[in-house]
Image (cartoon, grey):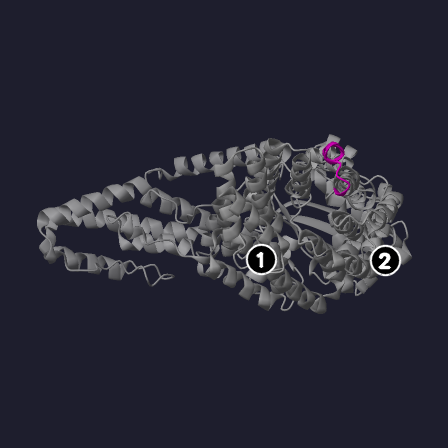
Amino acid sequence: SDIWSLGVILYEMAAGRAPFTGETKTDVIVAIAKTEPPPLARFAPGLPPEFEWVVMKALRKNADERYQTIKELESDLKKLKQKVVFQTELERSLGPDRLTGAITTFGDTDVPHHSSHLSFQASQPATMHSTSTVQSAAQTRASSVEYIFGGIKRHKLTAAAVAVAVVLLVGGIWFLGFRRSTPALTNKDTILLADFVNTTGDPVFDDTLKQALAAQLRQSPFLDILSEERVRDALKFMEKSPDEPVSPEIAHEIALRQGIEVVLVGKISSVGNQYVISLDALNGETSDTIAADQAEATNKEQVLKALGEAASRLREKLGESLNDIKKFDAPIEQVTTSKLEALRYYSLGLKEHSSGRYDEAIPLYQHAIQVDQRFAIAHARLATCYNNTKQLDAARAASSKAYEYRDRASEREKLYVEWNYYGAVTGEFDKAGESLDVWKRTFPRDWEPHHLLAVRYTLTGPFDKAIEEASEAVRLNDKEPKVHANLANAFIGLNRFEDGKQVLRNALRQKLETDSMHQHLYHLAFISGDAAGMKEQLDWASKKSPGYLPNVWQARAAEFYGKFAEANQFIEKAVDNNRDAAAQLISQQAIRAATFRDCGKVSALTSKALSFSRDLLYLEHSAHALAACGQAAAAQSLVSEMQKRFPQDTLQNSVWIPLIRAQLELARGNGAQAVQLLESTRKYEVYGDYWPQYVRAQAYAKQGNGLQAANEFRYILDHRGWHPLSPLYVLARLGYARASAQSGNTAEARKAYQDFFELWKNADATVPFIAEARQEYDKLK
């Protein structure tokens, strides 16, 4: 490697540029590993080709093909210098006509035996050039070579003394300074965990120790561990199975490709009944050891404890402060589990979980919890899998257990557990946000709290904060697809449609992809009337989730244009293809029926939806649809159930229940009371699919306040990006027309009516709004 490094220096001295370049550090690393440097002659035409051969041999990728000793390289350089000096003297004394034979004779008598390439023969007869040209070239070549070799002294004793002094000085500086005081890592570096090398023959250690080590190291706010998701993405990019074990060799390749600074390799071996655990932190580029530690365990039950102690010592060797280690260094059995079997099943579950196989992960997590009921992070992961498979009550139960045992988790995981508990179990929205704020302050290198805060702000507003948090999440982890989708969603919410599209296209070009990315692109194509763009996304959805995603998207598009019957057909197909989503789809169908005043169907639809699930979201949707149709008793019964089961839920108490009650007051003709009830919704103004603004506008109109009603309807029209396919956006145009007419602004009213007619020119004839609007418009004329 020192010979290779000298080749790099010689190349740069001669060419005036580095042999391996790139726009980023990763590009440079890939260039070193995969590409050859440009020919030296391109940048230094005056140098002899033999010099380029010497440098390129020093730079060979295969170490066996390089010079094997520095003496060999030194010998070739000396011979080359002698040859250049000799050639220059000949040119001066003999002239160009007699030069070729002399050089050939020199070359034949002084070729290095170990390198037949260095024959030192002139590539072309010198007689092809004029005397002045040859002399000029010779002077250029001689001066260039003298520059390269300018540091070589004539007196060998002096040179040797200088060399020894330099070696001692550099070595002393490194040993006394760098080795003792310079940390192996900085807070900007990333660690990749390779799979443990298990030579014991006992499968209980497979995957288990890697997860235990990850849990121990992730306590640290200083260390940044490459996530399992990014490792899987890297393997896919390398055209390997995402489930392939990450051997030390594969880890090294991932590190080179992604610019990872450190690869951490763990090994466990057995000697009789005892176990030896070793940890080696290797330079991601060179595989040199930069820190290491070792521990022994007297029996299998002590292995986790020994591993935790070795990991703690390694953290200090990697440069973490003693204060941080002291503060964030709970014993490994406390932040995971003391039972190897529980950890093994947890590790197997995490593999399935990371692959998106949630149904397969659930029984593995359950087995881990049976072995150790206080295994907090296993409960938390189980909750996520339940949530992703729409088992929402089970998800809440698992989240509650994780919260109960949160002291058996690391500080980072404890914050995750608290966020999930407040967000999914109690619904205390602000407390969930506080957990995320503490999380991002305590662990400033974590992308996840920024991402989750961005999700929060895209749900309830404001979108400028969503952009701020999503941008930080992208900065911290630009390989995570979700953060790009979230950033795009934030731009769309501010009507910055081109910015959102650019974010999505850039992510897809990097092979970063989620369903929501394509959904956002479908929405953007819909907004701009891009039929080809919509078809492109529907084609993708048909391949990804045939029968479900394309039907859901087309249902929303149909209802936007007043095609109520067509929208219902699409939803029925979607329900047939995804029974897990039946409660959600049918409860939304009930809201659609209420929106289009088809109230005769609402009661049956809400009953059907709640037969699939009585989770909070479906209770809210059903009560909302019933209230919009003035069915007070049924709506209030569901509200009572919501309050009893979820008394602390913020969005329920601040948005849904006030909205439901405001609709009931509006049905009674009490506009003022409806406006008052809706005040609490302003804090979460984006939430609710425009319904709080829409009902508030109707309440103002009921009071005869056309100007205020027009302002509320206009507010919906000015925020198209909030809910791009909502039919309330179209109905807000009709509402704005009516409110403008009510306030005496006839010209504005006419234009708004015309816009409404254009959007719903192909709406179902049975929709009552069309005929009413025509009569109102005719009166204005």
Q: How many marks?
A: 2
Q: Quadrant of residue 382?
A: bottom right
Vertical relation: 76 (above or below) 693: below
* Predominant SS of the magenta segment: helix
Which residue corresponds to the image point at 90% horizontal and 53% vertical from the top-left?
372
Q: Quadrant of residue 316?
A: top right
Please say whether residue 670 is one of the residues in the magenta stretch: yes
Give yes or no for contact between labels 1 and 2 (Cβ–Cβ under 8 Å): no
- 448 or 317: nearer the viewer: 448
Amino acid at circle 1: Ala
Circle 2 packing at 10 Å, graded few (<14), some (14-19), many (20+), is many
Pointer 2 residue? 368
User: Does residue 645 appear left or right of residue 759 in this picture?
Assistant: right
Q: Secondary structure at mark 1?
A: helix
Pointer 1 residue? 557
Please say whether residue 288 is one of the residues in the magenta stretch: no
Amino acid at circle 2: Ala
At which x and y percent is residue 509?
49, 55
- 660 or 305: nearer the viewer: 660
* Circle on res. 532: none
Vertical relation: 177 (above or below) 256: above
Q: Is there any visible trace of residue 155 in the rendered image?
A: yes
At which x and y percent is residue 708?
62, 32
Q: Secondary structure at mark 2?
A: helix
Vertical relation: 46 (above or below) 68: above
Q: From which residue to which does the magenta span run?
A: 667-677
User: Does residue 553 appear left or right of residue 107 in this picture?
Assistant: right
